[in-house]
Image (tube, rainbow, N blue to C red):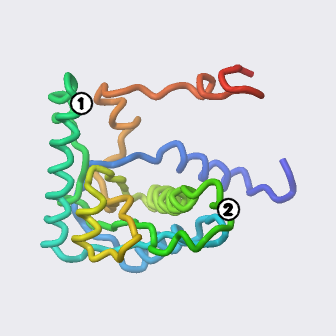
Amino acid sequence: MTEHAYSLEERAALYRAIAERRDMRHFSGGEVAPELLARLLEAAHQAPSVGLMQPWRFIRVTSRELREAIHGLVEAERVRTAEALGERSDEFMQLKVEGVLDCAEVLVAALMEGREAHVFGRRTLPHMDLASLSCAIQNLWLASRAEGLGMGWVSLFDPAALGELLGLPVGAEAVAVICLGPVSEFYPAPMLALEGWRQPRALSELLYENRWGEQP
């Protein structure tokens, strides 16, 4: 513990938000107040980024027609994913994988165009732009949980098709369809674990020391 640590209550709240964050698929409609949405997006914008490039761009989808078109892209990819899963296809089709039509707000998180001009921190690891955007999304996720709102990250879509739908410039790339809004309850564990799709692994299985595969 150092003199810069938060109070015990503040630390407990932070760790609680991390532990209770869920990838939500079930929403109860409602609204997100404008000032709350602004606060959440500001939290996302405060994320770290390599070379301070801030590669994230957020598109708020307020058109019902556009939301339904996005849902159509997600549904098409859901079917293609099921086909690719082979023997687990029927099981996959039983899962609820998105809440695009049910949530209060839909946001699309995208990477900006012209990222090749940013070399700082990306010369050998060009995908650090995606890592930076992921940090912004995680900020949004944790802040949403702290505010009592559910959030789901939907990745089932063709990025090119979604980019065309939203008028993204050449070089920009859609990364996430974000469903945000009130929920009746939060899942007590990750939904895929509750549905029996896959169980989380213990940290001890994923932590190595000095060399790959060597346990501490």
Query: Which residue occupies 20% across, 26% down?
Result: 86
Badge number at residue 121? 2
Numbered label attached to residue 186: none
**Closer to viewer: mark 2 or mark 1:** 2
Any part of residue 197 in sight: yes
Q: What amino acid is found at the position of numbered circle 1 in the picture?
A: Leu
Q: Is residue 155 left or right of residue 85?
A: right
Percent x, y of residue 89: 18, 29
Q: Nearest the camera: 42 or 120?
A: 120
Q: Which mark is residue 85?
A: 1
* Residue 158 in the image: above or below residue 107: above
Q: Position of residue 214 (x, y in %)?
A: 70, 20
- The crowd level at tag 1 (other Cα within 10 Å; few <14, some 14-19, many 20+) is few
Mark 1 secondary-structure assignment? loop
Q: Where in the figure is residue 40, as x and y percent of width and height?
A: 47, 69
Do the residues under discs 2 and 1 have CB atoms within 8 angstroms? Answer: no
Using the image, determine if residue 131 lies above or below residue 31: above
